[in-house]
Image: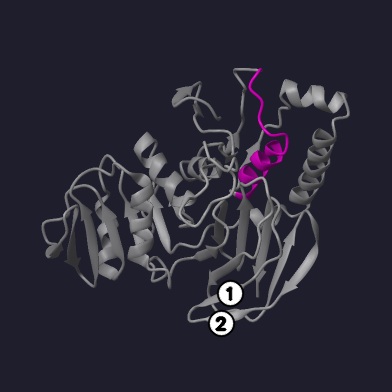
Amino acid sequence: MLGDDEAVDGSVTRGLWPGTRDTPRKEGDADIASASREPWVDANGYLAAFERALGGTALLAQQHKDESRGVPFDTLELALIEARVNGGNFVLSVEPRYRKALVANDAKALEAWANLVRTLKWLRANEALFTKPAQPIITTLVERSIASSEIANLLYRRGASPLLTAKVPAPNPRILALVATGLKAVPPAAFDHARAGATVVIDTTPPSEARVIKTDPDRRVLALGKGQIFAYNKRIADPSEFALDVIDIVTHRRRAARLWNAPATIPLATEGGLLHLINYSGEPTKEMQVRYQGKFTRAMSIGPDGPPQELKVFKRAEMTEVFPPPVRRLAVIQFR
């Protein structure tokens, strides 16, 4: 449920309507980032994954409290896309302004409605694409709290493509970083990942057996077994900067996915060689460059706006690079 941060009858009511938010710009264009400025993106897809990880129902909805406040017509389609891609669903409720525009045969409203219908049919026909777990490279422990939710939120927003889980998984060589910040207490089993060779990230007290090997102003790096622990000195206050820290810990070379020329696009790299690209901007992407973890020889772009398109692939160390066609709202890259 999207709205204020509170629980009502077992539902979670928080989040913001998806899309790029208008901010004052002298050139009058708030949706396109310059070289030194990123668009302000509001996204809620992480909530579906978050609720699934906690065993809840991944059903998102939006109730407009102020009927005079409109949202772009095509963002209703965006709300459905981000929920479905993350394994949930969205309650389609057409706001009054949108309904009036449809009745009046407004061109923009009719175009948005046609896109919504086409995308809905495509999502139904391709439901199997959205049931696979995220790559476990950055595995994140979550619990029902605002702190935990915001860390998951910004890891998604920063393109870290985290796998969210409420239980500590068994150590796995594919898990490079186990994020255990924002929790009331870190489960002792989490440190087994460090002992096995991974990096465990915490903002609580590390185990006494861990040995300090480096001290930074805001955190310590400790050795434990074959791996290490990044222990922040204080609770995470800036989840956005923290998400970038986690990506740096994993390194760009080993992260699940990486994008260029798409500041308003959020990637989700899942098992089965699938990379989901959701464009939150009101304009199609241009000259987007994409890398996906793993070595593949073929790739195809599929989506609701046209037929499948075979892509040329380039090997980049342990990653595969492609240049997908413009993405209006959603594209899925299938690597084989």
Separation of marks 1 and 2 at Cα, in angstroms? 6 Å
Indicate the position of residue 182 as horizontal and vertical percent values. Answer: 31, 43
Which amino acid, mark 2? Lys
Quadrant containing the C terminus is bottom right
Which amino acid, mark 1? Glu
Q: Residue at x 76, y 27 (%)?
A: 98
Q: Is residue 170 visible?
A: no
Disc 2, SS: strand
Q: Residue at x 39, y 65 (%)?
A: 175
Quadrant containing the N terminus is top right
**Which badge, 1 or 2, is on the more N-terminal residue?**
2
Q: In this orientation, which residue lies closer to the viewer: 284 or 310?
A: 284
Which residue is the site of mark 1? 321
Vertical order, 187 against 147 (above or below): below
In the image, which residues are magenta? 68-85
Q: Is residue 87 visible?
A: yes
